[in-house]
Amino acid sequence: MASTTSTISTSCSTTRRAFMRPKRQLRLWGAVGLSLGIIGPTLAMAGNGQGTVAAVGKAVPLVFVFGAIGIALIAHGFIRLTQRYNHAGSTYALVGMTVGPRTGFISGFCVMITYVFFSICTLGALGSFLNAFLAAAQGGAHPYQLPWIVIAVAGLALSAVLNTRDLRVVTRVLLTIEGVGILCMIILAIVIFATGGTKPTGVDFSSFSIAGNHFSGIMGAVVAAFLSWAGFEGCAALGEETNDPKRNIPRALLASVALTAVLFVVVMFAQTVGFGTGPAGLKLFSTVGNSLTSLGQTYVGVWFSLIISFAAVMSAFACHLSSSATSSRLLYAFSRDGLGPKRFAQLDGQRSLPLNALVAVLGVTLVVNFLSWATGWPGGSATPALNSYFYFATAGAICLMVAYLLVEVGTISHLTRERREKIAEVVLPVLGGALMITVFYFNLKGQTSVTAPVYLAFAIVLIGVLVAFFAPGLAHKVGEGLSAELGEPGGKELPAAAEAGEVFPATAR
């Protein structure tokens, strides 16, 4: 076994000499910055409550409590696995090394598609929020508005410029943007609580009660809460670019989840009581374009609403910036293992960045946004840019939850095979996986439109499954790649083949 594994590792390392490895240039807060950028706290709190209140009424804070519990369970799995494995492919490697190469490919494929969807949808949010800011700044009944595709193209161009700079610059920009937004939300929440919320309902703690709602309705709405946290694991894709990754990546995951869990529950509670838990207040909450801006003007003043409105604009841009950066690294990781064009596996020599993969991601983002603007698809509300945002964001969140489910399976395998001293923790990934399955069920239940985002998401997952099980040699390529890049046998299926005396051939380049 030892001699065969050595042969595999030697073969793999030989085939990858032509491919540069990224430089380790990030510290802990750089990794936290990328995760916060993808989460987009200000964007999430400005737009994700409206759909939730329409589904569960005043129980919005309770939905986010369930969401926080679910994300904490998922985060446990990522923390445990990144203490052992760190790779540009994120779940591609985490699942590939614990469950098997084919399953690892499916997981990584889902995450890559998720971040491409997020790269697309956040430009729609950018267009909607910037026009809302322009309208608030001008006042009057007929403010000047830009076509949202113009804003999207401008945002994409700026993203391309920043993403070709030193990654440390990008993460500092992300931390600054989200830091300003978080500060504004904290100030707004304090003011709302200090004034006692909207009369006569006031600070109504019955918002944390399930009374008046069915459990199925609560669980169906939890996908909106998961959407708010989607991307917390983005820093896992920086495992090859972060100093001391087995220490700093788990810490970055814990920091991003702990910070946003408290923030989201408190801010959603503040927004609910800020609008009021009576029928009129809940109806207003469900219809406003940017809930933070509306409350900022009501409780503080126009000047504050403009600041928080612009913070939401920048948060949407930050989410696009970090999503495109992450998806390009996932595409690079796949291509490096022979699962994509060779040119996407190349790094820019001076900046150690996957520029070709980045150009591909931004190109797809531009084409999809242009088609969405030109055709008006997907329809829905009177705001086409937000239609695009919610559609692709929801589809992306469902794809991501499939990857989360596979990470939970990988965590169970890791704990039972390699961390027997922590075997009691296995209950956490079991609960996390059960929660993912429950959310899938209640989001599929009652769907009538074949174009619903949940069906698009599962169609994407099916494509990944078909490729994983029918593409010739895929398991060998993934196992070979992970073995070379992580310096050990590539997942559950690889050692089994090695024991049979099989030495995998070099991947053609």
Image: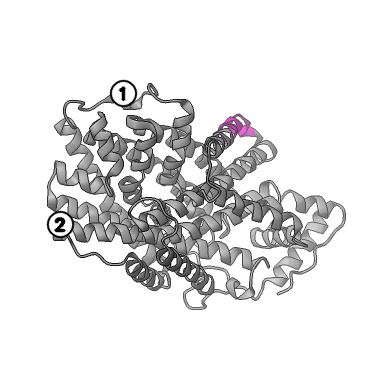
Q: Who comes first in sequence, dot 2 or dot 1?
A: 2
The image position of residue 452, as x and y in percent, is 51, 48
Is the residue 78 above or below the residue 340 in the image? above
Q: Secondary structure at mark 2?
A: loop
Q: Residue visible at 40% across and 65% down?
A: 373
Asked if the stretch drawn in magenta spans residue 17, the answer is no
Q: Nearer the viewer, mark 2 or mark 1?
A: 2
Q: Nearer the viewer, residue 296 or 99?
A: 296
* Place of residue 7 in the rendered image (x, y in percent of width and height, measured from the top left): 79, 63
**Left or right side of 219 for 409:** right
Closer-to-camera residue (435/257): 435
Instruction: Please report the residue visible at 55 percent of the width from the left and 33 percent of the height from the top.
Output: 438
- On residue 266, the disc is none
Q: Is residue 277 above or below residue 233?
A: above
Please name the residue that numbered disc 2 is placed on: 141
Query: Residue 475: percent from the left, percent from the top?
Result: 74, 57
3D distance between C-alphas at marks 2 and 1? 38 Å
* Picture layout, residue 275 above or below residue 108: above
Helix, strand or loop at disc 1? Answer: helix
Indicate which disc residue 206 carries. Answer: 1
Q: Quadrant of residue 433?
A: top right
Task: Identify the residue at image location x=71%, y=50%.
Answer: 100
Tell how many labels: 2
Relative image position of residue 455 (x, y in whole percent): 56, 48
* Residue 144 in which image quadrant: bottom left
* Tag 1: amino acid: Ser
Over which residues does the magenta segment extend?
A: 421-431
